[in-house]
Every structure is written in structure tokens, then in C-alpha cells.
Amino acid sequence: MAAVTIRSELRFILNGKDVSLRDVAPDQTLLDWLRLSRLLKGTKEGCAEGDCGACTVLVGRLTPEGGLVYEGVNACIRFLGSLDGCHVVTVEHLAAADGRLHPVQQAMVDYHGSQCGFCTPGFVMSLYALWMTTPNPSDREIETALQGNLCRCTGYEPILRAARAISSYGGTDKDPLLAERETMIARLKDLRDGARVEIGEGKHRFVVPAGLDDFAAVLEASPNATVVAGSTDVGLWVTKHMRDIAPAVFIAGLDELKSITVKDGTVSIGAGVTYSEAVSVLAQHIPVLEPLIHRIGGQQVRNMGTIGGNIANGSPIGDTPPALIALGSTLTLRKGAERRTISLQDFFIAYGKQDRQPGEFVEAVHVPVPAASEKVAIYKVTKRRDEDITATLGAFRLALADDGTVAAITIAYGGMAATPKRAFAVEAALLGKPWTEATVEAAMEKYAEDYAPLTDMRATAEYRALAARNLLLRFFVETTSGAASAQVQRYEAA
């Protein structure tokens, strides 16, 4: 690999001004820096874990194709080290120089969308991101955009009325981010010097690799470093558990990890692809994954979190691994210049332990597109509908023979064991048998051989065991009654 230039400062744009920082800690959050160092107090601190949306700001980044996209993110769990080459926009940047409010802000005022006001900047920024891409959104699009924003005053209806009215105020031609887009693209391209960023030493060191090969070299040299992609989980290590993440390697800006390709019946997703980036392709080729993704966190979390990170983290309640296991996915792992491919189900060994060598990382996940004749369903069970951690998640893929017997079946669960895990005993009880209620009820007795769930704050062991069994029964009912083999949507549930 050619020699890499090393830069010892972080460079990005805040609102309209260039920022260069040399004294940055690996665990310094964007929220703390905005409020304490730049005194931009419009961005609020609420939960400090990416749930309430009070800290929402926009981060603009160049796409691999050379365009510019702005996304709402949670500043409370976004680290400064991940912002090299980005444009950070806070609520203070929206109003015009003469004091006129932005259409999003004016609509919130006119429709009484601000009550105590604490959550208002976050709502404004989320609606701003929506308005830029979808000037006339449907109610469902508005609700999806606001999944990650909590109003403590229960003022949702006025906020929805404001969201519906934004475009009636006009102003797209005068919007600062839309009017200056080409200029901002040029400024951000100027920040891309192809250098590796290295700041600090020892326990205070972090690195932003120059590219994918450089990342592989950095991690091979420092295998104990914390790899930070979207920080939707690592952020909580810092804000809630006070964990030391240094030395850290920030990879959110690596374009080489952002690819999504569809070839020979397989969707290959780079480890740096976020949920928001993946959802449209997955909706087209594997539609059953779309409603699952829309229930992963709020929009801000989906804009930051990556599918590769969800896998590499190895959490027993990660949402995508059970679904991807059921679909027969494989992983590409890389260490230095060497790559290997393994089955995703074999990647998870024990709690907190994956089949990953020191210095090795997840480079891509490859998801086979189910055959048209296969029946696939994913069910996520939580205490509340949106933005909640999984109690248990069941994923099913079924192929029936011409005589109605089970030709192939894969069942995987999250939240039922120390890792995402297949239900091998249940599968064996179904394979080759007629797909009937009697067969399914007999197979349900085999769950105890596959899983011994725990009790925690999300659910009791007894509830998990019962819910898991019943999800198989639900899958049977849906595949035999003509009901849609997908999760019940909010509007259907209502």
C-alpha cells in the first residue's frame, strides 16, 4: 500500500464556518462540544442515549456519487471524530440574517407546535430534514420522520399540523442548505485531502482512516482499538457506562464500505451502509426487511446505525442478525489484505464472542433473495411499537414441497439466548412433515431444547418462551390463511 499522509487535525464545517480542531478526545460528543465549546444552546440534552431527539442536528455528507445528503442525527451519541469532512447544521442556522424564521420554524409557531419548548429544536431539525427531501409528505412519512423525537407535553397533533403546512409557506428557493448546495459540495470536496487523521496518543488516540486499505492496516496494527461506525451503541458505552473507547477508529466516512450491489440473486451490503441507505434496495428485493428496519430506533438512529455494526457488535438482541440468518446470509471478513467468507450463523460463538480474529473486521454481508415460492416473515416483539429494544425477535423462511410437506425451513431468534440463534430442534421437528396445525403444535414443544431465555427489564423468561412459540403459530396461520406474512403495521393495529 502506498504511503499515507497523516493529518493531526479534524476538519469540518459548522453551519457556515470552517472548523479545525487539534485537541479532541476520542469520546467527545458533538452535543457537548456544541453546547460547551461553541455555546450553541439550541441543541438540547435530554436522554443522552439517542432516544428522545432533543439533540437532533443535521449532518451533511458527500455521497460516493458526489452528491450531498443531509440527515438528522443524535448529537448526544455522535462523536466529533466521526465528522471529518462533514457539514454540521444546528437550529441556529435556519433563520434568515434579518431574523425571519425558516418555514419549518414559522409553521411550528403558527400551529402551536411548541409547548414547553424543550423538544422543539429537535422536532424542527427532523422536520427540516424531511421537508428538504419530501416537501409534501404524507402523514405516515411525517410520523416515520418523527419516530425518534419525544414531546413531553404530548403536543403531537399540533406538530403534525405544522408538518403538513410547511410547504404552504414556500421558501425552498431561499432555504440556506438548498440555495448553497453547490457551494457546500465544493467546500466539502476541498476538505477531502486523502489524508489519515490521527489525534492524540496512547489512551487518548483516535484515527480516521484515509480509506478502506488504510483502515485494514490501522486495525491490524492496533487490534484492540474500538471500531466506531454509527456509534448508536458505542455512544451509550460512553454516555451511560462511562467506558473508555480509546484508541478509537472512526469509519463512518469510508466510501468503500458504502456499496450496495445486487448480483446473481444476492444483495451485498457494505459494512458501513446505514439502515436508511439500505432500506430502499432491501424493500425492492427483500420486502420483508423493510418494516423491520422502520422499527429499528428512530430516524436519527437509522441515519447513523449500520447493518455491519449491528452484526459485528454481536448483541443477542440485535435486530438484523436473526433475520439475516434465516435468509441464509454470509459475511466477508477482512484482516489486512486477506479476506474470508463464513456463514453468518457461524459468526456468533458465545455472548460477547464472535468468530473474528484480532485485527479482523466485517467488510460486507451477503443476503440471498428468497425464491418467489418461499414464505418469509419477521416478527419483532417489544413493549412499545416504535423505537424500542427487542424482547424477542423471530425470523422464519419456509419452502413447501408440492405435496404440502416442509421441504426446507430456517428459524432464527434474537433475545432468546446469549447470541442470535437458530431453532435447530424446532426445524428438525418440522422438516419433511405436512405443514399443518398439528405438526406446528408438536414442533412448539421443541423450543425448550433450543432456548433457555433469561428474565430482564424487557421481558421475563416465561414471556419470551411463550411469545417465541406463538410466533411460529402466527407464521403458520399467516402462511395458510392468506394473511400477509409481515408484521402488523401501525395503521392496521389501530
Image (tube, helix red, strand yellow):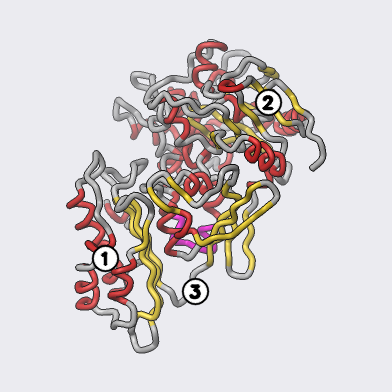
Judging by the rendered image, the residue that carries numbered circle 3 is 371
Residue at 68% x, 46% y is 336
Image coordinates for residue 305, horizontal then vertical, percent: 50, 41
Q: Is residue 474 left or right of residue 313?
A: left
Q: Is residue 310 above or below residue 33?
A: below
Residue at 34% x, 28% y is 151
Residue at 52% x, 67% y is 369
Choose between 431 and 279: the one closer to the eye. 431
Choose between 102 and 38: the one closer to the eye. 38
Image coordinates for residue 202, horizontal then vertical, percent: 60, 22
Q: Is residue 479 above or below residue 1?
A: below
Q: Give the spatial CA distance, label 1 vs label 3.
A: 21 Å
Image coordinates for residue 248, horizontal then vertical, percent: 57, 30
- Residue 335 visible in the displayed image: yes
Circle 3: residue type: Ala
The numbered disc on residue 198 is 2
Q: Is residue 382 left or right of residue 466?
A: right
Q: Is residue 20 magenta?
A: no
Circle 1: residue type: Arg
Circle 2: residue type: Glu
Q: Secondary structure at mark 1?
A: helix
**Disc 2 crowd, CA 10 A, few/some/many (<14, 14-19, 20+):** some
Image quadrant assignment for residue 447: bottom left
Q: Magenta stretch?
A: 282-290
Q: Is residue 214 above or below residue 331?
A: above
Q: Is residue 283 magenta?
A: yes
